[in-house]
Image (cartoon, helix red, strand yellow):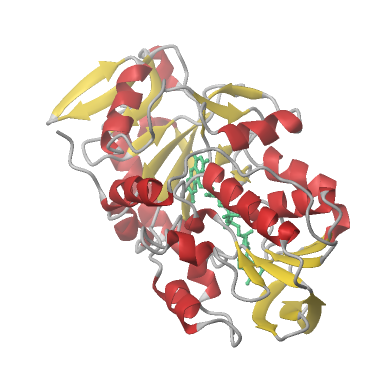
Amino acid sequence: MVAITRRQFLRRSALAVAGVGLVPPRLVIKGPAKKVLILGAGMAGLAAGYELSKLGHDITILEARTRPGGRVFTMHEPFADGLYAEAGAARIRDNHNLTLKYVKAFNLPLEPFYPADLKAVRFDRGSREEVPISGYTDAMTRNYGGELGDGPEIWHQIKGGMDLLPKAFAAQLGDKIQYGAAVVRIEQDAKQATVKFVKDRTTQTLTADVVLCTIPFSVLRKLELPALSSRKKDLIKRTPYDAVSRVYLQTKSRFWETNGLNGFAFTEGAIEIWHPTWSQPGPRGILMSYARPTEADRITKLKENERISETLGQLDSIFTGLRLNFERGTTKCWLEDEWSRGAWGFVGVLEAVKASEPDGRIYFAGEHLSPWYSWVQGALSSSLRAVKLIDSTADV
Ligand SMILES: Cc1cc2nc3c(=O)[nH]c(=O)nc-3n(C[C@H](O)[C@H](O)[C@H](O)COP(=O)(O)OP(=O)(O)OC[C@H]3O[C@@H](n4cnc5c(N)ncnc54)[C@H](O)[C@@H]3O)c2cc1C
């Protein structure tokens, strides 16, 4: 039997309590057109803006960053030759129907996430094995304790980078998105909701019939929220977020391929090693380590050069010759990201349904409110649930 982690336990229990799976709510036009202010242009905010606009509502999205996508971000810098790797969301499972629905709607090209050729490296009880990629995905599924659900291990990625998906939403929404707009205060009264945000170093104010807040609770707890119920504020304050760290090493060549390896590995400490550039033109390549708590907490505390040199040493023992081929490295630790403060969070099994309910004119969405938290699928399903609620309410 496989011991399950806190994350697996939460997801399984939440699915059981909420009685929900991957099926999205149906969107039907019911209520009057509303002015909606959406906070955050991650997947939840973008999908809500897109669907609410289609339903005839007047939307504006305020986004603190200068780009759309939030935790979906494809890194092109500092890599050479147009190579890229994902900072956040990277793989789409074949049963993530909502994510795939939008990928298809925007005509984005999919390709397999994992290479079918060559061998992956897997460490198990002290021994090193070279296995087909199914040996890697088995180890991953076992480590996740089956939380990924039933069904074949078919994983996709968007060719050209995962952030083509948020960019496609953003292209549809145009100037309805205000970038560099950091929300600092959310208020409401009997007539309207009011949001204060800082843009171009000045504090500005916008009002609306309703607000849809998709800001991660890890960031939201630092904002002024005078008009929220104490129960909601308490939840926002205590929802835990996990650390995740990724360390990227660019190499002169993909020397591991000449040794019959595809660049993927699963270590004893359940750290995944990816070769994000396997389907991109060479000769250079990128190897990436992907650590979760508690290893990621430790790595986050290191300096950038320490993270890189330590990972270089670890990966050189798996792919001999890495040091000689290494050119440059970079890292992404999500705890230190100002607008995420963690990789993913979940409000909790017993709180999930209540936490998703609106507080007056203020509605909530985001991966942290879905049993499918830590996936784009979760952000989208919570978003569509909020869209349905906002659209159907007559009381504005
Ligand atoms: C390392 C990592 C790996 C992952 N891997 C996968 C994967 O392989 N497959 C998958 O499907 N999912 C994956 N995910 C999860 C997926 O990325 C998220 O579930 C999803 O993108 C979350 O979307 P969201 O809209 O809920 O939140 P976010 O993307 O965080 O969007 C919230 C937005 O709010 C903005 N914001 C924050 N504060 C403010 C403020 N004060 N004012 C204005 N705007 C603000 C943020 O900048 C952000 O754009 C991964 C995530 C991480 C971090």
Location of residue 38 (image quadrant): bottom right
Question: Quick one: 61 or 256, which is closer to the camera?
Answer: 61
Quarter of the image that includes the C terminus? bottom right
How far from the left and from the top, in percent, is residue 353? 47, 60
Ligand 1 is located in which of the four quadrants?
Answer: bottom right
How far from the left and from the top, in percent, is residue 357? 55, 65
Location of residue 100 (image quadrant): top right
Q: Is residue 72 visible?
A: no
Q: Is residue 166 left or right of residue 19?
A: right
How far from the left and from the top, in percent, is residue 103? 68, 32
Q: Is residue 59 above or below residue 97?
A: below
Q: Is residue 163 above or below residue 251?
A: below
Q: Is residue 31 left or right of residue 336?
A: right
Q: Residue at x 34, y 54 (%)?
A: 296
How far from the left and from the top, in percent, is residue 163? 66, 42
Quarter of the image that includes the N terminus? top left
Q: Is residue 263 visible?
A: yes
Q: Residue at x 79, y 82 (%)?
A: 205
Question: Quick one: 287 or 177, which is closer to the camera?
Answer: 177
Q: Is residue 167 above or below residue 319?
A: below
Q: Is residue 180 above or below residue 28?
A: below
